[in-house]
Every structure is written in structure tokens, then in C-alpha cells.
Image (spheres, helix red, strand yellow):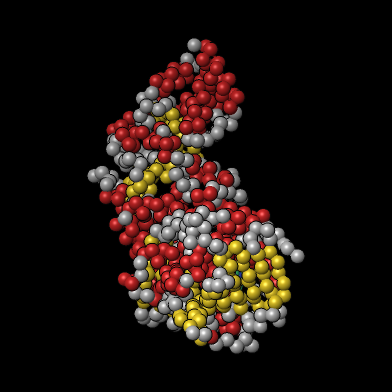
Amino acid sequence: MKKQFKAESKKLLDMMINSIYTNKEIFLRELISNASDAIDKLYFISLTEKKLKINRDDLEILISIDKDNRTIKITDNGIGMTKEELENNLGTIAKSGSQLFKESNDQNKNIDIIGQFGVGFYSAFMVSNKIIVNSKSIYDDKAYSWVSSGADGYTINENDKKSNGTEIILFIKENTDDINFDEFLTEETIEKIVKKYSDYIRYPIKLVQNKEKKSEEKTLNSMIPIWKKNKKDVKDEEYNDFYTDKFYDYEKPLKIIKSEVEGRCSYSSLLFIPSHAPYDYYTKEYEKGLQLYSKGVLIMEKCGDLLPDYFSFVKGLVDSEDISLNISRETLQENYQIELIAKSLESKIKKELEKMLKENRDDYEKFFTDFGKQLKFGIYSSYGLKKDTLQDLLLYFSSNDKKYVTLKEYVSNMKENQNIIYYACGESLEKIELLPQVEMVKDKGYEILYLTDYMDEFVIKTLMNYEGKEFMNVSDEKMDLDTKEEKENLNKINEKNKDMFNIMKDFLKNKVSSIQFTHKLKNHPVCLTTKGDVSVEMEKVLNTMQNENNIKAEIIMEINENHEISKKLESLYKNNEKDKLEKYTKILYAQARLIEGLSIENPTEISNLVCEILANK
Ligand code: ADP
């Protein structure tokens, strides 16, 4: 009975069958990679299941070509598939593939994915018009045969295959006007493709040749894992291919970090910094970790203990002779070697990032845009413990040209006698730029860091200071650029108007803790500042979190003493026009809230008040 492919698979399959993608040869890489994974799985199980007697030297992948019948056969002696697995694995597209497939809707992007990421088994339909998969699982006495000629479905029947593993027979398409499919039926081409994409596969890939009625085998791959090869013998392109293939990315990595370490714990590692954050990076689903190999044998797909959380974006692998094949997840955490390797990797990653920051600023900024949050989170969640490791990797937008700067750069640009690092917070650079408090600080020639990330200010508070320089929010009440004389003068004015401010405060039903005149504004009439640890921005963030609402910033309304409005208020107060003073106060407060990016509690009331005043004029 013919079964139908799942809808999504069918779509992919159609794409493969009618593929205009020119690089069709990658089908072999995909099938060999599957075969190698299947052997890995078998070997892995044999490490713990003693009943399974596996001799590592017997594990292999065979390829044979039958020109007359136009077939290529790829055989592995790996774990094999049960009937259900044939059904589930080949009837639906792979999880990894399907996610990427879903993400990319347009045709061009799809083609890119076939090329760079590979969509696995189905890519074989680019070159075949029929595929037979004969497989026997180590868990089943029976073998099964999966047959499909493409989009019209597939059949699964019992089969008499005796040995464990999988055999895939591709029926190669006839040549067309544009495409020469015959070439895939030549040994030279197959050998070339294997060398190009699968040389590092750790099991022999043997071409079965029939010479004068005798069958001979020729091993095509060097079997030296790419991470064991000398860096100068490997082209960047090969590392990139290895990365996109093994770590399911469709873009090449931003940085390749290869190292070979001899010492208390010897290891080789090949790490990659992705050029973009995976779609699930900032979700709970994302799992950090590196592949862990012991003497070239994969023993764990994702070893999380090898990476600190703040470097969780790093992909790659570690291969060590000092780690036992039988290491289990439980013992891993207390494993001394793993700890040593993790420490050494951490400092390597840090060094590479610092180097990138110094030598390749564009790349670093690209990196930081995608992964900067994670570094900041590292400082915050360690309560500053990781400050020394991470603070010099941070970038902030500067009021000068709105370009990224490091804290070090900021400090080295400080004005003479400047002891404070100024920052301002807001939703976007544009909005921060418009904050009334920003104008004066900039005007006096100070650089300001513009913080747009919701966690930025929390991180700044965790850092406390940088090279002995304290941070200050330009919206902090303490913010003060006046001379001593100016200060005394302002204090006097505020003292004189104390009663008026108290009345105004009552009008606002104590929504602000005080009201005062200020000189920190240049042209703007009014602003809100905060006193103490919680700023307005922090209040916004805290109130979006559960259990944290009701944390209130202590707000001060500051009115520009040099602005006409201050004179107006004073005259209203003097002439005892309380009614008007109340209206003015409420409008000023509403304006200040809007400027801060806060909502106003009663927009209708404010709108009515404004109209009343407009009408009276
Ligand atoms: P992917 O390799 O990305 O998972 P594929 O479409 O290539 O996607 O394969 C789907 C699944 O089919 C694999 O995950 C694996 O479980 C199974 N599979 C494919 N080829 C083999 C094989 N030679 N031996 C055993 N299982 C295989």
C-alpha cells in the first residue's frame, strides 16, 4: 500500500525533485553524514551494552556504482532503522531541517539552505528518480525496505537483509539538456565528492570496484578528523563547510578558534562563533554545549559543562585523550578534566573576542549586536563576579556620533576633571537623544552612553564603577554640572519657593516626592529625575516582571528656572490663582511623564485642561 508524505515533507520533496539548485553533488555528503551518524550511534550504544559485540575496525561505509543499471549504493553497518523509524524518519523531514525550512519562505532562501545547510536524506531526490532504503535495526530481527519514486508516496515492505545497518540505492536520473547526471555514475566523480566533503569522516568510506571480475575496495577518505589536521592544511572553506554541516547553520561562522593543548589535560578543540544568533537563542529551549569526543569517538552531543553561560553561543567540539569513553552525564559534572578544559576554553574564547574587538571592529560589532545581551547577562547574573572577565567586552552607543564605544574608550575620552561616566536610558537612541536632561550634559561637552537594552541599567548598577569612575544616570536627581556659586544661587531660589512647591505637590496627590527648579535643562521646561537606586527605566522593567510590581522610583519633578514657565508659576502663586496653578502643575507633570516614555494616568483630564487654557487665551 502506498503511503503519502506529510505535507511539509512533500513540499520539500517537490523542491528537491524539481530542484534548480546546481550543486547537486552535496547529496552524497548528506547520505554519508547520515551513515556516519548511524555508525556513531551503534558504537556509542556498544560502549554500555556489553551484549553488542562491535569491533571498531569493522565499521565502514561502502559505495558501489552500477553503470548499467544506473544505480549508486551506499551501505553502512550502523544502527539501522526499524519499520517505525523508516516511516517516521524518512516520511517526515528532519527536525533540524524542518525548522529552518519553516523559517525561510522565499524560494531563493530555500536554495541557500539546500546548499549551505543541507536538508538531509531528501536531497538524494535531486539526482534520483527512485530510492530504495533497505534497513535492519539492531533492535529488530526483521529488515524492511522503503521505496519511493518521489512525491506520489512510498511503500514499506519486509525484506531479507541479514546484517545490521542501512543500504541506500539511488536510481540516477537520465541526462537532461542542461544536466549531466551520468557523471555521478563515474568513480572519479564519486571519489572527488567524497574527498571534498567527507574526508574527515572517521570511518572508512570505501569505493567497491569491480576489476576483472574481482571486487576490490579503495578507501577514499583520510579519516583524520578536521580538528586533528594542521591548521595550515585546512582551508577556511573546509572549516566553514564542517561548521554549517555539523552545527545546523546556514551561514558560515564569524570566527573559527582552533587549538591544541598539551598539559595536565591534553585536548584539541575546534570552536566557532556563529555569525548570527540562532532563532531560539534567547529562549529556554536553547541548550548550550560542545560536542565531546574521546580519542576521536563522539561521547556526548552537547556537553554544557564545557561552556560558561555567558559564552553559550559558542559551537564546536572538544576531543581529549584524557577523558574516558565511559564517562556518564552524572560523573561529568565532578570531572576534574572537564573543569580544566572548560577553564582553558573560557580564556581562549575571551582572548579571541578581545582580539576581534581590537583588530576587526566591524565583526565584533556584528557579534555584539547578536550576543551582547548574553555577556551583559553574565555580569548581572553573577552579581558582578564576572565583571573582570566581561566588562571590557561590552559596547554602548555613545552620544558622539551614536557609535559603539567600550568603557575603556569612554574613560580615555573623558574631559579633564571628569570623574563620572554619564549614561541615559530609553527605548531607542532617538528617544534618548530627545530627553531634556541629555541636552545640557552634551552641551557642556560630556559624552553620554545611550542605554537601550532593558537590562542595561541593571548591569551598570552591578558594575558599580569602571576603573574607579562611578556611573551616573543623567536623569538622576544628583546630576549636577553647576559651579558652586550657581548651586548656592539655585538653592536660595528653591528655598524661597518652597511653599509654592508644596502646594503643587499636593495638587499631584504626592505622585512626586518633591518639586524644584533646576538649571540642568537648557531649553526644555520640565523633566522628571529620580532619587535613590531605582530609575524610571528600571521601574518600567521591574513592573513588567511578575512579583516585582509596586517597585516605585522616587520621582522628582524639576522645572527649568530659566524658562518663562517658572516666572508664570511664581506669579500665579503670588496672585493666589490657585485654580490655574493646579491646572498648570498637572499639565507640566503630564508632559514630563510623556517625555520620559511613561503613560499619563488620566489623558482625558489633561486634554480638557490643555483645551481650557488654549480657549482662555
Ligand atoms: P538529519 O540527518 O538532519 O536528521 P535526514 O533527513 O538526513 O535528516 O535523516 C532523517 C533521519 O533518518 C535521521 O535523523 C536518522 O534518524 C535517520 N537516518 C537517515 N539515514 C540513516 C542511516 N543510514 N541509518 C540510520 N538512520 C538513518
> Is 480 situated left or right of 189 in this image?
left
| 314 sits left or right of 139 in the view | left
Tell me if residue 594 comes above or below residue 138 in the rendering.
Answer: above
Residue ID at (58%, 69%):
170
Viewer-proximal residue, 222 or 334? 222
Q: How many marks?
A: 0
Q: Position of residue 224 (x, y in %)?
A: 42, 78
Residue 34 in the image: state x and y as whole percent. Answer: 55, 71
- Nearer to me, 322 or 239: 239
User: In the image shown, does 377 or 358 lie closer to the viewer?
Assistant: 358
* Quadrant in which the N terminus is drawn: bottom right
Residue 153 falls in which quadrant of the image?
A: bottom right
Which residue occupies the foreground of this view, 45 or 3? 3
Ligand 1's quadrant: bottom right
Whether residue 117 is visible here, answered yes or no, is: no
Residue 317 location, x and y as percent? 45, 71
Q: Position of residue 351 (x, y in %)?
A: 34, 64
Q: Residue at image x 43%, y 56%? A: 275
At horizontal 66% and vertical 80% (from top left) the residue drawn is: 161
442 left or right of 529 in image: left
Above/below status of 563 relative to 66: above
Residue at 58% of width from left, 71% of height from top? 69
